[in-house]
């Protein structure tokens, strides 16, 4: 019988989580966090490590168990676990977390932050206390069971209006560069249509990297998507000048065409703040941009053989843009639902990296589930 796990003290874990909040995960290896390190040793090893090592893996797993919503989002920003925030100063991360709750930074610091970090510590303690689940025992959320992995694709059938027609919507839970056989992938952009460096982790950087043509040893031959986007801005008289938020630029998919991706629609939703590294994203600009995506899709569809039909959307503005996932999805779904309600026959996909966010989207869409899909399904059983 394996030894019982050593459950760490909640107070000790909380003190170390607060230490991580001040330093950020980018400095995690330099921190003295014995309780979190001990928790990492008690958990089963995975196939790989997070960028910050086993302690970051523990923190990410703990935060992923918080059920989505404002609590989880605030925790991700507070610790620098949200996409694009690893190197943010503590003050910037606290400000973003305060925005999630819609309160001032000072009020968040005094009233909300301890609750958020306390819940992170609670999940760390529970992770260790649960240990490795026995066969047949309940599995903690998002932790792979001994004989089953969470489904990377979930198909929902939704009622969009009062008609009998149902619409399939697919949730992809993986990096955007793993998509296959989708006609149009939507990519968030800033209003200058300036792509981030290809080594970064954002959706637009990932698509740029995956769309580049390389030689057999990995050397860059052609940065196809970036070249085409620069050409688009030149043709439309916008090089070096900001476009209106909600504008959509169209490029090919570059090397991703080998995976069945045919077009990339770049939606300008992030407005850079002068003399900072931050952006402002307005939900109305997301809705307007997604509506423009569908208008362009209708214009372009018939010019291709076979016609364009499927489109995949990430959570626009939920990375460096700073929008909570709930707010981002609400803004883009407003345009998607309006398009489908008028009878459009597009094949709709969404892509997120984490199962916690896929669960959030599935809960939000739950009210639209078709009656025949409310019972257990193979997809649901696989989660």
Image: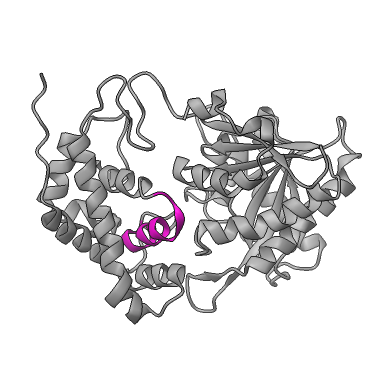
Residue ID at (8%, 26%): 3
Residue ID at (51%, 48%): 360
Name the one closer to the observer, 285 or 14: 14
Q: Is 216 placed left or right of 2 in the picture?
A: right
Name the one closer to the observer, 27 or 366: 366
Q: Quadrant of the N terminus?
A: top left
- Residue 327 drawn at (x, y percent): 57, 61
Q: Is 118 placed left or right of 84 in the picture?
A: left
Q: Is residue 82 above or below residue 224?
A: below
Q: Main secondary structure of the magenta part?
A: helix
Give the residues drawn in magenta, as a range.
67-80
212 drawn magenta: no
The quarter of the picture where residue 127 lies is: top left
Answer whether residue 300 is visible to the viewer in this image: yes
Name the one closer to the observer, 162 or 183: 162
- Residue 78 drawn at (x, y percent): 34, 63
Answer whether residue 206 is visible to the viewer in this image: no
- Residue 99 drawn at (x, y percent): 45, 72
């Amino acid at each position: 019988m394996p030894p019982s796990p050593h459950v760490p003290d909640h107070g000790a874990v909380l003190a170390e989580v607060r230490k991580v909040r001040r330093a950020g995960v980018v400095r995690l290896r330099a921190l003295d966090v014995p309780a979190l390190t001990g928790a990492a040793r008690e958990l089963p090893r995975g196939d790989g490590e997070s960028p910050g090592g086993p302690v970051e893996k523990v923190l990410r797993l703990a935060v992923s168990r918080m059920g989505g919503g404002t609590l989880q989002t605030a925790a991700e920003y507070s610790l620098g676990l949200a996409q694009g925030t690893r190197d943010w100063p503590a003050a910037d991360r606290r400000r973003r977390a305060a925005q999630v709750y819609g309160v001032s930074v000072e009020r968040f610091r005094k009233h909300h932050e301890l609750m958020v970090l306390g819940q992170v510590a609670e999940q760390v303690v529970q992770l260790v206390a649960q240990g490795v689940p026995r066969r047949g025992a309940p599995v903690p959320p998002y932790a792979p069971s001994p004989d089953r992995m969470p489904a990377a694709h979930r198909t929902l059938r939704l009622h969009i209006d009062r008609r009998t027609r149902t619409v399939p919507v697919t949730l992809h839970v993986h990096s955007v560069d793993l998509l296959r056989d989708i006609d149009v992938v939507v990519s968030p952009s800033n209003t200058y249509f300036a792509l981030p460096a290809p080594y970064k982790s954002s959706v637009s950087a990932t698509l740029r990297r995956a769309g580049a043509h390389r030689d057999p040893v990995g050397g860059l031959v052609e940065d196809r998507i970036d070249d085409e986007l620069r050409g688009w801005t030149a043709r439309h008289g916008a090089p070096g000048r900001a476009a209106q938020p909600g504008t959509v630029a169209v490029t090919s998919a570059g090397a991703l065409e080998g995976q069945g991706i045919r077009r990339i629609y770049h939606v300008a939703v992030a407005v850079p703040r002068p003399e900072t590294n931050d952006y402002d994203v307005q939900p109305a600009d997301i809705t307007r941009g997604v509506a423009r995506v569908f208008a362009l899709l209708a214009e372009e569809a018939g010019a291709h053989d076979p016609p364009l039909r499927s489109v995949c959307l990430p959570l626009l503005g939920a990375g460096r843009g700073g929008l909570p996932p709930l707010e981002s999805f609400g803004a883009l779904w407003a345009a998607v639902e309006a398009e489908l309600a008028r009878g459009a026959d597009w094949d709709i996909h969404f892509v997120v990296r984490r199962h916690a966010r896929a669960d959030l989207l599935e809960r939000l869409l739950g009210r639209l589930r078709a009656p025949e899909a409310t019972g257990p399904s193979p997809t649901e059983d696989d989660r």
